[in-house]
């Protein structure tokens, strides 16, 4: 079974520029998550999708971050404009739906450096 | 909202010894508690999880215990091996949503 795919793996941009990350979840996984992991910290949930609907985006900085999941499969996370404090690894995860049955499978992440 | 604390932040053990990592959570509604292992340059990988209707779960050298009354859960690794060296994260969730992770424990297994 193929795992969660993310691209790019690395991205370097200057502050105030825009950036987008792509995630392809495991086939059949209806739930998709985006996390931000700052160096030395645990992952922080940004947004959770169930199919193409948003379940939780309470910690997404909506003034600069946006995410979409068209057709309930692939997803993109965008930052516009980027700030220095956005430097982090952005992790995508997917799981089967169903209350507490949602074991998450993580992708390798995209490491973003904002200069 | 939920708050998850994790201790210790770093842990060094001799190969073959046991390692214990402890987490506490604040939201009594949390009912799912996974543990993840993260190696350098990789995403977290689930190693074991426990649900609120169970007090203990074991999978070979790894076990997790949950005390709902005290709101804490622990990861136990026995007979540690060098390949167990990694960063370990606990997390808490309510009904498969609102996942909150602890800050992590860096485990080093010394040969």
Image (cartoon, grey):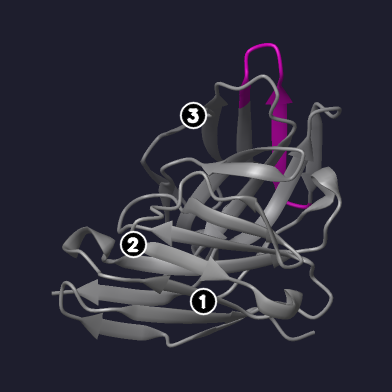
- Give the residues in magenta: B60-72
Apparent side of residue A106 relative to residue B29 in the rendered image (left or right): left
Q: Quadrant of the N terminus of chain A?
A: bottom right
Which residue is found at the position 74% from the left and 74% from the top?
A72
Q: Position of residue B24 (x, y in %)?
A: 54, 25
- Residue B45 lies in the magenta-colored region: no
Which residue is found at the position 42% from the left and 59% from the top?
A36
Q: Quadrant of the C terminus of chain A?
A: bottom left
Mark 2 or mark 1: whose residue is earlier in sequence? 2
The residue indicated by pointer 2 is A64
Q: Position of residue B51 (x, y in %)?
A: 80, 36
Quadrant in the rendering for residue B70: top right
Q: Which mark is residue A108?
A: 1
Q: Is residue B111 visible?
A: no
Kindly check if marks 2 and 1 are in contact, taking CB atoms under 8 A apart as contact: no
* Chain of the residue under label 1: A
Mark 1 and mark 3: Cα distance apart in space: 25 Å
The residue indicated by pointer 3 is B3
Please name whichever residue, B100 or A69, is drawn nearer the observer in this view of the structure: A69
Apparent side of residue B11 relative to residue B31 in the rendered image (left or right): left
User: Element under label 2?
Assistant: loop
Mark 3 and mark 2: Cα distance apart in space: 25 Å
Q: Position of residue A100 (x, y in %)?
A: 81, 44
Residue mark closest to the camera, 3 vs 2: 2
User: Element under label 1?
Assistant: loop
């Amino acid at each position: 079974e193929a795992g969660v795919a993310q691209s790019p793996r690395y991205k370097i941009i200057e502050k105030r520029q825009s950036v987008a990350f792509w995630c392809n979840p495991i086939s059949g996984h209806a739930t998709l998550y985006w996390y931000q992991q700052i160096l030395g910290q645990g992952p922080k949930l940004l947004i959770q999708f169930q199919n193409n609907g948003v379940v939780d985006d309470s910690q997404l900085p909506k003034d600069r971050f946006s995410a979409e999941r068209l057709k309930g499969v692939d997803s993109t996370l965008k930052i516009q404009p980027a700030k220095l404090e956005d430097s982090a690894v952005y992790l995508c995860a997917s799981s089967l739906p169903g209350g507490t049955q949602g074991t998450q499978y993580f992708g390798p992440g995209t490491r973003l450096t904002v200069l | 909202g939920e708050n998850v604390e994790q201790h210790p932040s770093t842990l060094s053990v001799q190969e073959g010894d046991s390692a214990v990592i402890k987490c506490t959570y604040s939201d009594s509604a949390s009912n799912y508690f996974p543990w993840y292992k993260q190696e350098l340059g990789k995403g977290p990988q689930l190693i074991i999880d426990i649900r609120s209707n169970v007090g203990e779960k074991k999978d070979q050298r790894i076990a997790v215990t949950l005390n709902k009354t005290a709101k804490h859960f622990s990861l136990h690794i026995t007979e540690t091996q060098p390949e167990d060296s990694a960063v370990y994260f606990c997390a808490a969730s309510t009904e498969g949503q609102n996942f909150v992770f602890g800050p992590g424990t860096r485990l080093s297994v010394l040969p």
